[in-house]
Image: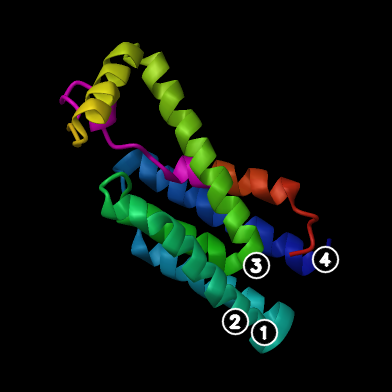
Amino acid sequence: MSAESLFAIVVLLGLLGIAVVGDLRHHRIPNVLILLGLGLGLAGQVYSAALAGLGYGVLSMLIGFAIFLPMYALGGMAAGDVKLMAMVGAFLTPYDVLSAALFSLIAGGMFGILIVLVRGQLQQTLQRYWLMLRSGAYLAPASDEVAAKPFPYSVAILSGTLVSLIGLPLGL
C-alpha cells in the first residue's frame, strides 16, 4: 500500500469519525464536514491519477449519492447520510464505493435489528411490518417505538466503509 493510499484512508476514516460524533450528539452531519471531505477526496484522486482520478472521484461520489438517495426519498434516511456516502465515494473508485455502500447498508440493518432486540420491541416491530405487508401501505411507528427515533446512520456508514476497506486489496 502506498503512503498516499494510507493517508487517504486515514483522512477518510477521521472524517467519518467526526461525522459519527456529530450524528450521535446532535443528530446532524455538518455540511462543512461533507464539503471538506468532498474537496479532500477529489484532491487526493487528482493527486493520485490526474484528470482520470478526478473523473473516478466524481463518478464514485455520484454512485454513493445515488445508492442512498432512494432511501432518503422514502423517508428512511436523513439527507446528511446520503451526502456522507457521497463524500465516501469521493475517496474511492466506483467499484469500491459500491462495496462500501453495500456493507454500510448491511451494517445499518444489523444495527437496526440489534437496537430493536435490545429495546425489547421485536414483537411490536414485526407486527407493524406484518400489517404493512398485508395492507400494502406504510404504517408509521408509534411514538414509543424505536423505529420512530432518529438513527445515527453515520455509524453504519463508518462500519461498512471500514469493512469494505479491510476487504480491499489496499491499492486505492
Give the camera-side residue of 72 and 78: 72
**Crowd class of label 3 (few under 14; some 14 to 19; many from 20; radius 10 Å):** many
Give the residue at mark 1: 52
Give the residue at mark 4: 2
Q: Taking 170 as reference, is 146 above or below it? A: above
Give the residue at mark 2: 55
Which label sits in the foreground, 4 or 2? 2
| Magenta span | 141-157
Q: Which mark is residue 93?
A: 3
12 lies left or right of 155: right
Label pair 4/3, CB-CB below 8 angstroms: no
Quadrant assignment, res 115: top left
The stretch drawn in magenta includes residue 147: yes
Counting residues from the start of the chain, the first of labels 1 and 3 encountered is: 1
Residue type at tag 1: Ala
71 lies left or right of 11: left
Counting residues from the start of the chain, the first of labels 4 and 3 encountered is: 4
